[in-house]
Image: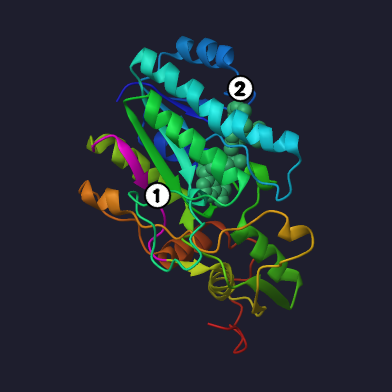
């Protein structure tokens, strides 16, 4: 494989792609926001043409906060939509492969869904972030013939998400569980938690496999609610904290950003391409907590009988 340029290299997924790519001794150029502005076509052309990439990995996203001003909502489209388009056109002109990351939040409109979404299911975002990521996907697919659009979901990794203050749901639960006796977590939103390290390894495997270009889901196998996810985090970290189910708020500040009820996805196209599926989300979480999150947690703590399983 020729030179790989990684965008968003200090982000959560970017950090794992950088680490895994370095382990494989790839010719990897890691760029951060300080190096390139993907919403600016001149910056894209100037920075990338000097690097002569064969592959571009785009982990860049404008996301994170739960309430958005109209200006912030425009920024979603500038970065997630137009930014992706600038990269797509660059790759098409220069014959590069564009690996563009997207999200399960392109789904969610179906009110009674209870089956994981596959790649062929029509997208149906319920919020502005999902709509802007869908725009990016479509622009990549329309303007760049050599592409992999990869949807991950409910991501967690050791670096934490930049847009969430270098945190993620696992870190947030572990941190709160150190101080609070009880955590209340929503039990009416279903998703497929994804460890970014596993997604990073699978991404390089996909590129290397020569699988047909197109759209691929890449999420931890299975699904759960955020409550079930939190309960498993607390159990695996052997913390005595109680986790209680609650419902998505319908009023107050947290209600302003519409959250989809069901965005679980399955990795159908990966399997079709002859690649192995990602492990079950519980297996990934167990390894992640064991290897990355035990420092602040007492490993020898005796599990309390009150910890819900
Ligand atoms: N986090 C999740 O739960 C989740 C779930 C599903 C899908 N995804 C998708 O997975 C991908 C990676 O997410 P992540 O969690 O790794 O996000 P992240 O930690 O916030 O990383 C995003 C990176 O993009 C950079 N960036 C932002 N705007 C930029 C711009 N205009 N030009 C250049 N760089 C820019 C950020 O740099 P600065 O911070 O310095 O601006 C940061 O390094 C994204 O496509 C996201 O939509 C994430």
Q: Residue 234: horizontal and vertical position, in percent? A: 59, 73
Res. 36 in view: yes
* SS at circle 2: loop
Q: Nearer the viewer, mark 2 or mark 1?
A: 1
Q: Magenta span has 218? A: yes
Left or right relative to 261: residue 118 = left
What residue is rendered at 25% in x and 52% in y?
Answer: 271
Dot 2 and dot 1 residues touching (CB under 8 Å): no
Question: Which residues fall within the magenta stretch?
Answer: 211-222
Q: Magenta span has 62? A: no
Mark 1 lies on residue:
122
Q: Is residue 272 above or below residue 87?
A: below
Mark 2 lies on residue:
37
Q: Is residue 245 above or below residue 61?
A: below
Q: Residue 9: horizontal and vertical position, in percent? A: 54, 33
Q: Earlier in the sequence, mark 2 or mark 1?
A: 2
- Indicate the quadrant containing the N terminus: top left, top right, bottom left or bottom right: top left
Mark 1 surroundings within 10 Å by alpha-carbon count, few (fewer than 14), some (14 through 19), many (20 or more):
few
Could you say which is closer to the camera, residue 169 or residue 101? 101
Question: CB of residue at label 2: within 8 Å of ligand 1?
Answer: yes
* SS at circle 1: loop
């Amino acid at each position: 494989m020729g030179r790989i340029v990684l965008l968003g290299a200090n982000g959560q997924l970017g950090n794992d792609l950088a680490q895994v790519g370095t382990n494989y001794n790839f010719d990897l150029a890691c760029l951060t926001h300080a190096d390139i502005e993907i919403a600016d076509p001149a910056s894209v052309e100037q920075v990338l043409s000097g690097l002569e990439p064969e592959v571009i990995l785009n982990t860049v996203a404008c996301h994170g906060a739960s309430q958005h001003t109209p200006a912030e909502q425009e920024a979603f489209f500038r970065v997630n939509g137009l930014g992706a388009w600038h990269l797509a056109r660059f790759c098409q002109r220069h014959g590069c492969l564009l690996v563009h990351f997207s999200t399960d939040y392109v789904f969610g409109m179906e009110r009674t869904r209870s089956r994981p979404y596959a790649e062929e299911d029509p997208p149906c975002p319920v919020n502005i972030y999902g709509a802007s990521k869908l725009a990016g996907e479509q622009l990549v697919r329309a303007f760049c013939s050599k592409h992999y659009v990869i949807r991950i979901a409910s991501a967690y990794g050791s670096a934490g998400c930049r847009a969430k203050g270098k945190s993620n749901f696992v870190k947030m639960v572990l941190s709160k569980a150190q101080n609070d006796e009880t955590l209340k977590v929503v039990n009416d939103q279903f998703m497929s938690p994804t460890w970014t390290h596993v997604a990073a390894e699978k991404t390089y495997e996909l590129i290397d496999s020569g699988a047909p270009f197109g759209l691929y889901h890449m999420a931890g196998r299975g699904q759960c609610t955020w409550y079930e996810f939190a309960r498993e985090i607390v159990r695996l970290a052997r913390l005595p904290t109680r986790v209680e189910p609650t419902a998505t708020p319908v009023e107050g500040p947290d209600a302003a950003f519409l959250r989809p009820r069901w965005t679980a996805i399955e990795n159908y196209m990966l399997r079709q391409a002859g690649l192995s599926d990602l492990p079950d989300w519980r297996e990934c979480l167990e390894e992640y907590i064991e290897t990355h999150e035990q420092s602040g947690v007492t490993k020898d703590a005796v599990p309390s009988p009150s910890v819900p399983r």
